[in-house]
Amino acid sequence: MNNNQQKQSANKLQRLTQWRYASSIISIVLMLLSLTVIGVKGFNWGLDFTGGVVTEIQINKRITASEIQPLMTAAYHQEVSVISASEPGRWVLRYADIPDENKRPELQQVLAPLASELTVLNSSIVGPQVGQELIEQGSLALLVAMLCIMGYLSYRFEWRLASGALFALVHDVVFVLAFFALSQMEFNLTVLAAILAILGYSLNDSIIIADRIREQLIAKPQWSASDINNLAVQSTFSRTMVTSGTTLLTVVALWMMGGSPLEGFSIAMFIGILTGTWSSISVGATLPEFLGLKAEHYIVEPLPDTP
């Protein structure tokens, strides 16, 4: 390698270092803003958490959800979720409970303009106590998942690399939660499932980069931690972009074709994949460097010779 090539390589590494530092600062600032939004606005909890009525009906097969929903929303003065059931003409209606029977319209009257025959197959009420239990169980599931991930990372890597990957996970979850708090979109069980899926997806990217950092630290102990991180990001960048790009295409297809029941799940996954890719490259690789990561942490001292 001649002098010009060395200078170009050094300049490229320097620009990458500056980009990583700048992106990490941006991520921390946005994360603090996201926590503020979550604390101020809170969440628009769905019926899974607040309680409500779930009714399954059988109606003419030619009638669609786009015809049922406006009539239900106008009659019940609230957003009514209309979900397709297991067979054509079978629908699940979800809406908040109306305790006053005088203000509760009959389904047959509400949907009479669409069909003269309608059968209510079953109807159940999810009480607020059950919803509170779901909030507690969902929060516990997130906590247990994070603790298991932290234990695995601490075992797999030295704690500095583990802390970077863990911070990237928290970063991704906070961004998704902040979006739902800011937009006041319904936060239901499908969104919670998406957040748990995001934890696994983001962890995969972080582990690949952390593993490459560890390999390079052992192979090039004389290099600085900054240059090692840059080399690890460069060597995994194309793979990360291809993986994230193909996954995003799948999520977008699910978003466009899945309808309103999967809208929250798709949006959460979309945001999680974007932030997961960003955080793995920026904060996930930069934090260990600030915590004093060195090659000595991974070089195993040889055992003394025994006589």
Image (spheres, grey):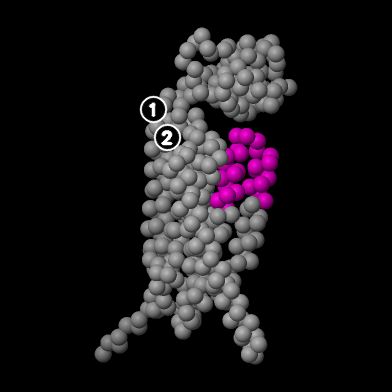
Mark 1 falls on what kind of element?
helix
Identify the amino acid type marked 2. Leu
Of residue 181 and residue 95, the one placed in the foreground of this image is: 181
Q: Quadrant of the C terminus?
A: bottom left
Q: Which residues are magenta?
A: 249-273
Residue under label 1: 129
Crowdedness near tag 1: few (<14), some (14–19) or many (≥20) residues, C-alpha within 10 Å: few
* Residue at 53% in and 18% down: 122
Q: Position of residue 45 (x, y in %)?
A: 48, 34
For residue 220, above or below residue 148: below
Of residue 62 and residue 231, the one placed in the foreground of this image is: 231
Q: Is residue 81 toward the left or the right of residue 148 in the image?
A: right
Q: Is residue 134 toward the left or the right of residue 243 in the image?
A: left
* Residue at 61% in and 22% down: 73
For marks 1 and 2 on the same chain, the one whose residue lies earlier in the sequence: 1
Q: Is residue 250 magenta?
A: yes
Q: Is residue 98 magenta?
A: no
For residue 225, above or below residue 274: below
The numbered dot on residue 134 is 2
Confirm whether residue 84 shows in the render: yes
Identify the amino acid type marked 1. Gln
Residue 19 lies in what quarter of the image?
bottom right
Quick one: which residue is furthest to the top in this view? 102
Q: Quadrant of the N terminus?
A: bottom right
* Residue at 55% in and 71% down: 18
For residue 43, above or below residue 10: above
Q: What distance separates the C-alpha of mark 1 from that of mark 2?
A: 9 Å
Q: Position of residue 74 (x, y in %)?
A: 62, 19
Q: Position of residue 91 (x, y in %)?
A: 62, 24
* Residue at 57% in and 72% down: 16
Mark 2 falls on what kind of element?
helix
Q: Main secondary structure of the magenta part?
A: helix
